Image (spheres, rainbow, N blue to C red):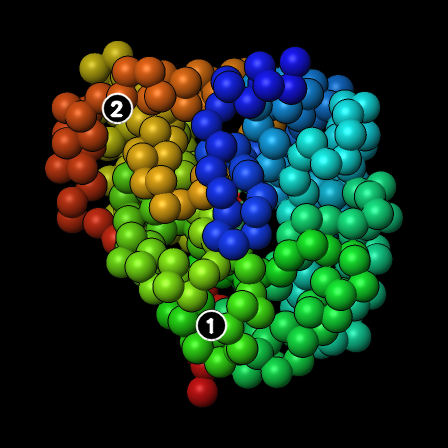
Amino acid sequence: EGEKREREMEVRELGRTGLKLSCVGFGASPLGNVFGTVSEEEAIASVRLAFQSGINFFDTSPYYGGTLSEKVLGMSLKALGVPRNSYVVATKCGRYKDGFDFSADRVTRSIDESLERLQLDYVDILQCHDIEFGSLDQIVNETIPALVKLKEAGKTRFIGITGLPLGIFSYVLDRVPPGTLDVVLSYCHYCLNDSALEDLVPYLKAKGVGIINASPLSMGLLTQAGPPQWHPASPQLKSACQDAAAHCKEKGKNISKLALQYSLLNKEITSVLVGMKSVEQVEENVAAARELATCGIDEEAVSEVEAILKPVKNQSWPSGIQQS
Ligand code: NAD
């Protein structure tokens, strides 16, 4: 039965970790109610369907919903009743509801708190969350060495960093001993409106780190319903994405499906994390991946949407503090 599940979703290797992740990963930030309220029943059913459909990678953080996402994900994974090594769990440290703290002391306590909420003995990946909000030199000299110790203690199998501005990844990777970091998680930089991550892929491969791409729907920009209130995009970017969504709808097409498929095309990127909060969204996203594997992408729709988004291509938004 396990084999049957694997056949249903492509898996890709994550850098040098030996982990094989489903190409679609389950982003659990919506389980922290950041995109509207999700009931426990819906969360459990969504995680179950995802797992049964071949999704084996689940990403969360103590920040999402002020620890709620970790608790709900932990409960939902437990409800699966499957062996621990049949799924991969990533969480983060350093970013919390009440702010950032990348000190060795805080991240060392953080993993124990996360493991308790997740009801796990270890996580597969522990990442410093949104490092552009901290001092990158502290990340290099203090936080990452603390994560290395947590890895040695068996609390996490692998370690990584996440954030928005792409320059943070090379800043850190150029300053830690080779092989220290196992994975980077980039978001909103490999989707229909912004593919800036592409240029960094050869560098990341040369450094031997696995690449995870989050937010293929640009945190809601590339959806028919549009982004949540807190979305940081400029009015111009929001309106261009709205135009693209309207264009797809007019043609009887679905912008979210196209967006996810676009992000899945680059096989150097191991897994695309899409935030899911309902059984229906899991069904749609699994179907999108299967359709891509069997029929390929709708090239015409991609070109049309790319033309609409051209004026805002690779337009991002400020994130973090100015590094000195
Ligand atoms: P996303 O681009 O995946 O968009 C999520 C939004 O799209 C949600 O509102 C979701 O309900 C909706 N959605 C999902 N499937 C849909 C479908 N088929 N049709 C219409 N709407 C659909 O953005 P995200 O959730 O922010 O990112 C995905 C995951 O990546 C997060 O949950 C998180 O785990 C991870 N992530 C990490 C970082 C970081 O570490 N700094 C940043 C961003 C995201």
**Is 94 left or right of 225, judged from the image as shown?**
right
Q: Secondary structure at mark 1?
A: helix
- State the residue in front, 64 or 137: 137
Residue 178, percent from left and from top: 50, 73
Q: Which residue is mark 2?
A: 297
**Residue shown at 81%/63% (left/top)?**
153
Q: Which residue is mark 1?
A: 173
Dot 2 alpha-carbon crowd within 10 angstroms: few under 14, some 14 to 19, many 20 or more: some
Q: Is mark 2 within 8 Å of ligand 1?
A: no
Position above or below: 202 against 323: above
**Residue shown at 38%/31% (left/top)?**
260
Image mark count: 2
Which dot, 1 or 2, sits closer to the camera? 1
Quarter location, residue 94: bottom right
Q: CA distance from mark 1 to mark 2?
A: 34 Å
Residue 76, percent from left and from top: 76, 29
Asked if one can make out residue 265 in the rendered structure from this viewpoint, the answer is yes
Q: What's the residue type where badge 1 is placed?
A: Leu
Quarter location, residue 102: bottom right
Quarter location, residue 219: top left
Position above or below: 111 against 77: below
Q: What's the residue type where badge 2 is placed?
A: Ile
Asked if one can make out residue 28 in the rendered structure from this viewpoint, the answer is no
**Residue shown at 54%/68% (left/top)?**
179
Q: Quadrant of the N terminus?
A: top right
Residue 71, percent from left and from top: 79, 40
**Is 184 left or right of 92, judged from the image as shown?**
left
Position above or below: 231 against 259: below
**Is 5 left or right of 65, judged from the image as shown?**
left
Q: Secondary structure at mark 2?
A: loop
Q: Earlier in the sequence, mark 1 or mark 2?
A: 1
